[in-house]
Amino acid sequence: MDNKKKTKLGLWLSIMLMLVSMIGASIVQTSSGSVTVKDLRWETTSGYQMSGLLFVPEGVSGENPAPAIVTSHGMFNNREMQDANFVELSRRGYVVLAMDMFSHGNSDSVPNIGILTTGMYEAVKSLASLNYVDKERIGITGHSLGGMSSNTAITLDNAAPERLISAVLLNSADAIYKDAETSQYTNIYNNRDVGVIAVKYEEFFMRDVDAQGNPTSPTKYPQYGNAQSFLHFGTDPAGKDQRATETLYKETIDGEEALRVIYNPSVTHPWSHFSKQSTTATLAFFDAALGTPNPIAPANQVWQVKEFFNLVGLVGLAMFVVCFTILMVHTPFFSSLRANGAVAPADINRRGKAWFWLLQLASVAFGTLLYIPLLTNVKSFTMSRDPWPQSQTWGIGLWALYCGLFAVLLMVLFYYMSGKKDGLSLRERGVVISLPKLGKSIVLAALVVCASFAWVFIADYFFKTDFRIWVLAVKAFGADKVWIAIFPYSLLFLTYFIANSVAVNSFNFNKIGGKREWVNTAILAVTNTLPPAILLLLQYGNFFSTGELLFPDANMQVVWLFPFLAILPVTAIIARKIYRVTNNPYLPGIINGVIVTLISCSGTLTWS
């Protein structure tokens, strides 16, 4: 079978994988059709539009109202990150509204965090307006900033003429322990049922002081004053019994029984999105607080099956990018971009091998050593909206820009110190390219990106799903994200991915590994990934062993690196696959740069 036929089969397989992903994920999140999923947009009382996925179980009606729960993601995420919760809660008969916080996902962007955190209560009011919701049993749960928004919702609910919230579960977020004015322990939650998922390895919250006033590690959070006061319903815990985690404590307040509980799963802050332990805690809490309409044991969970189907779609999408690109260069219009036969690895002598490993080491060291100082010493990498609307994309993008420019410097150095002497031809390896060919590369790259994201929008429109695994998500987006992506972020990512493609292919596609070409590809995919991998290992290795973060001032910035453990090796492989057919490093570099820019801009926080 020739390569073109294999590529056609690969294309059909990629489409089948994406369709299986959409259908399979939809079956799981609708509980095999017994839960209706609606994509909502509504105008809030603050004048900003909010977005959410509403899950309505079969049999729920005005005559048979059900308890309801609002779920919220954390900062730099979106509503789909709550899939473990909305799948399991709706499966058990709750009406669930998985919201996009203001400035996230499809909700309107707002100018400051004060407005942003009011979104949870806006979602509560929207749920309470539905005649099939039991208004006496409305709960809320939020992860991280979503938990902080839950506290804001409680404050707003306390001031409202009619109380709407009956139960609140804070996931990886502190409760309000003390009065802001008096610094005395307090109970703002009154007789509501309240729980806290205080993960053992918490990067951002759950810190206290011991009896001597020394700061404590979040790994020991449950045994100190804040946690103990919470479990004692906002009273001073001094002289009282030591209360334990995973235990429901009850007390009568204003004539009603209220409960308090702290769960302490052994996971990290971002992992709590993706944790069976945290999901079990969520299900157990709301069963105790609101009563489960369709009782199923908390440990009986199927959301992992949805995650599997989401991952299948992600794999299919990556395959589609490669196969569609290769088939397009076999069409008459783009045929000039096709090489005469598969590009072969270059011969390499002893000096070349020494340079190869030296340059890999230099690029890894530069990317690793630059990241923390760069992202912690520039004002715009905080939660500020200055100078651009997306701090996460700006920070990662600027790091990518510097790494890309450093890669160019290394390639120039190598060429004049070694490559030119050993007969390296920049034209033969695709570095030198004609303007017409570059123009066609840009046109084809745009076509590939549009065709690839068409499948993402099909998944969103028809099935209310996307392609993702944990914190890496390829999702649909609005036109506003396109304009944001164009400038300045695409310039930053394109610099890196074009330079990286040239380095991976034109300069480093050689016979290291012998006849097994995949060895060379694997080496470059790994070295691409080593900077984030090293930083994450250092940060969490120290955290797990000592209870303290190695880079405490860069906890958020290090968390941002998790998606790149997948993005960097996969883009290197995509670049190599396309280069072998085209001898053109710019085509895959542009494709990778634009796709990663769109992924980054559509899944994070955007200030107005």
Image (tube, helix red, strand yellow):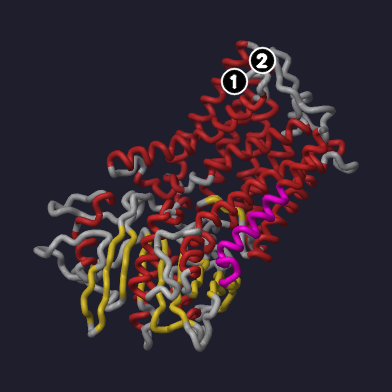
Asked if residue 205 is among those painted magenta in the image, a careful observer would answer no
In the image, 489: left or right of 163?
A: right
Query: Helix, strand or loop at disc 2?
Result: loop
Mark 2 — residue? 348
**In the rendered image, which quarter is residue 352 located in?**
top right
Q: Check the image and name the residue furthest to the left.
A: 239
Give the quarter of the figure containing the C terminus. bottom right
Percent x, y of residue 601: 59, 55
The answer, for residue 102, to whether it is visible in the render is no
Segment tinted magenta in the rendering = 14-35
- Is 10 on the left-hand or right-hand side of 489? right
Q: Are marks 2 and 1 in contact (CB under 8 Å)?
A: yes
Query: Identity of the amino acid at label 1?
Result: Phe
List the residue tagged with mark 1.
356
> Does residue 203 appear to the left or right of 23 in the view shown?
left
- Give the residue drawn at x 78%, y 39%: 7
